[in-house]
Amino acid sequence: MPLRVLIIDDHPLVRAGVKHELDKFPDQIQIVGEADNVDSGIAAVTALTPDVALLDVHMPGGNGGGGAEVASTCRDSATKFLALSVSDSPEDVVAVIRAGARGYVTKSISTPELVEAIERVGAGDAAFSPRLAGFVLDAFGTSEVAIADDELDLLSRREQEVMRLIARGYTYREVASDLFISIKTVETHVSAVLRKLQLSNRNELTHWAAQRNII
Amino acid sequence: MGGPAPTPTSSTPPHATPYVPTPGDHNPTQPQAGQAGASPTSPHPHYPAGPSSANDPAQRPALLRSPRLELPGRPAALLAGVCSGLAVHTGMSVVAVRIAMVGLTAVFGAGSLLYLWLWILVPEVGPERTYGRGRIAPSQKIAGRQALTRTQRIVYGALALAAISFILAIGVLMQPDLGYNTLGIVVIIVGVVIIWTQSARASQWRDPRVIGLAATGVGILFWGIVIVIGSDNGGLRQMMTSFTAGITFVAVLALAFFPAWNNLIKDLTSTRIERARETERADIAAHLHDSVLQTLTLIKNHAHEPGTVRALALTQERELRAWLYTGKNTVSQSFTELLKTTLSEVEATFGQEVEVVSVSDCVPGPAEQAACAAASEACVNAIKHGQPPIQVYSEVGSAQVKIYIKDRGPGFDPQQIATDRHGVRDSIIGRVERVGGSVNIRRLQPGTEITITVPRTPFDLPAPR
């Protein structure tokens, strides 16, 4: 049963390119629509209710919030957002994650990896690119580890290890084999990190984010 | 091929480029039509032609003066460019306007007063005029021929006008005791003219020369007024009383208008700053657009050489990212910047993308520099013997710096490196161990990961120059 995917990006060439690439995997992905600005993106998500929406960060329309605005406006819908952008600045990445996106991948990603990321996000997990993992480690710091499980402001030791391996370029499978855990456990850790990134009010994170004018 | 985008001040390359050469590069006495064949537009700002369309107010060109420049489409200015400006604005011939101005002068000096009025108020042609029409904001000064210096023009012109007005005014007034009045008026005019000559340098009012000349002008003015008033009224006390009243009045007026004047100055300053910022941004944007255009043209021309295309795209992408997304850290202050710069050179040399993820930063000392150099060697290794994607991760901890270089190639066994192949052994392992670090080579399925660990340079050691 292929995942229903919506592409929201204001560059027509990019939309055509992504659509062309994803059409090569008809068993896994089915493109149900395209949108090119914030308002039409929100309307398309509401009307088509795709499983996953590919979201660009910089887009015209709405209140000027770009992809982050689409993600936060549609926070209550069943659609899961995966940010796919050419920008790799920390501001854009963290802003869109804290608005509710469940992953961030750059446009230089290869198509099989993009399909895998879409499937992961569609299944409710998080898709982390090495760069996003780097931002996470930068934001939370690598010197301290959380003791309690529900600690929002620090990463646990295991989570730090997983993030570090992802930042080094390991796929989930390679991470799993390196740490002698299952892929499912890796996905759980990654989802936990995503939740912390979205919810944490850690001073350093807010300071780091404020320094970059994110919040 | 795949060289950097041409800088704007270089000479025009033989094939047509989309960038207009800077006007300052051209000899201004060259004929305006027919520039060197490459550039499609003339270097001077384009003024809408159309003396014949002057009947249509919507198409009438703006009233501007161009006293110092010789611009195509505008007649040359004799004195202050007022008549030539009027000629362009109304569509009449400049000779007709000049004759009319001289003729008006004969009518009680009205023509010379009109000329003076327009001289003061009509704005000059400047580079900002073409901001809306030009493709880029021309921040370069337009070179122009200057017959007289500005001060000379002002002095000669004002004197001439004043003399003309005065002569005609006398002809009208014809007062009995002409002598003192005449002298007084002449002295007043001289004082005013001296102050006018300093008007262009009002922003440098702290310069002693400016203050001196302005004070001299004020003094002469004062003396002229004394002569004129004294010749009419006779008594010194009466004169002093009226004088005091006059000066008090002026002082109170100045105080009353001071806040308004202050606000005006502030507004003007902020507008200037805004304009300067806009100009700079437009310049940067134009440079970027041009370098991107240039790269795209090159890519189009070499579309059948995938290696060249990839190298061009990579270089341009790096340049744009550097402009748009990365911070302004310099290589000497930031280890991350040093690593990224070193690796982008490797990228450019081999045309292969290297993804760099960095966590934390520090000031690079000798140990960190050695680590960067070793990482660059490891990347070259990965490009030559491994397979993409090549990923580099660097982490600056409290006590050590770690760099991981990973590729997906078939891998190699470090034990089996021949002793005469010095690549990995010396340039990577040797370099790192010399600063007290260690190198770990790890085989993956598939791929290789090289880990470089160096202890951080302690803070009290001076950074090498």
Image (tube, helix red, strand yellow):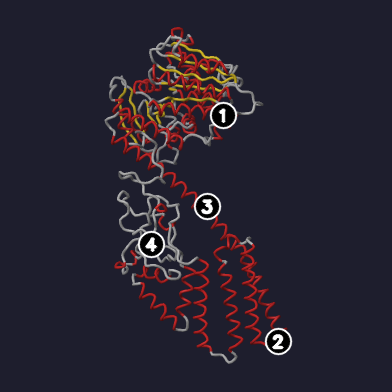
Q: Could you tell me which secondary element the residue under label 2 belongs to?
A: loop
The CA span between labels 2 and 1 is 83 Å
Q: Nearer the viewer, mark 3 or mark 1?
A: 3
The reply to whether discs 4 and 1 touch (Cβ–Cβ < 8 Å) is no
Pointers 2 and 1 within a single chain: no
Mark 4 — residue?
Answer: B71
Q: Earlier in the sequence, mark 4 or mark 3?
A: 4
The CA span between labels 3 and 1 is 35 Å
Amino acid type, mark 2: Gly
Q: Nearer the viewer, mark 2 or mark 4?
A: 4
Q: Nearer the viewer, residue A194 or B70?
A: B70
Q: Position of residue B382 (x, y in %)?
A: 42, 18
Q: Could you tell me which secondary element the residue under label 3 belongs to?
A: helix
The reply to whether discs 2 and 4 touch (Cβ–Cβ < 8 Å) is no
Mark 2 — residue?
Answer: B235
The reply to whether discs 4 and 3 touch (Cβ–Cβ < 8 Å) is no
Q: Position of residue B223 (x, y in %)?
A: 65, 78
Quarter of the image that includes the N terminus of chain B: top left
Residue B56's quadrant in the figure? bottom left
Pointers 3 and 1 within a single chain: no
Q: Position of residue B152 (x, y in %)?
A: 51, 69
Q: Could you tell me which secondary element the residue under label 4 belongs to?
A: loop
Mark 1 — residue?
Answer: A205
The CA span between labels 2 and 4 is 57 Å
The chain ID associated with circle 3 is B
- At label 1, counting other C-alpha atoms closer than 10 Å, the crowd grade (few under 14, some 14-19, many 20 or more) is some
B295 is higher (above) or lower (below) than B22? above
B29 is higher (above) or lower (below) than A102? below
- At label 2, counting other C-alpha atoms closer than 10 Å, the crowd grade (few under 14, some 14-19, many 20 or more) is few
Q: Earlier in the sequence, mark 3 or mark 2?
A: 2
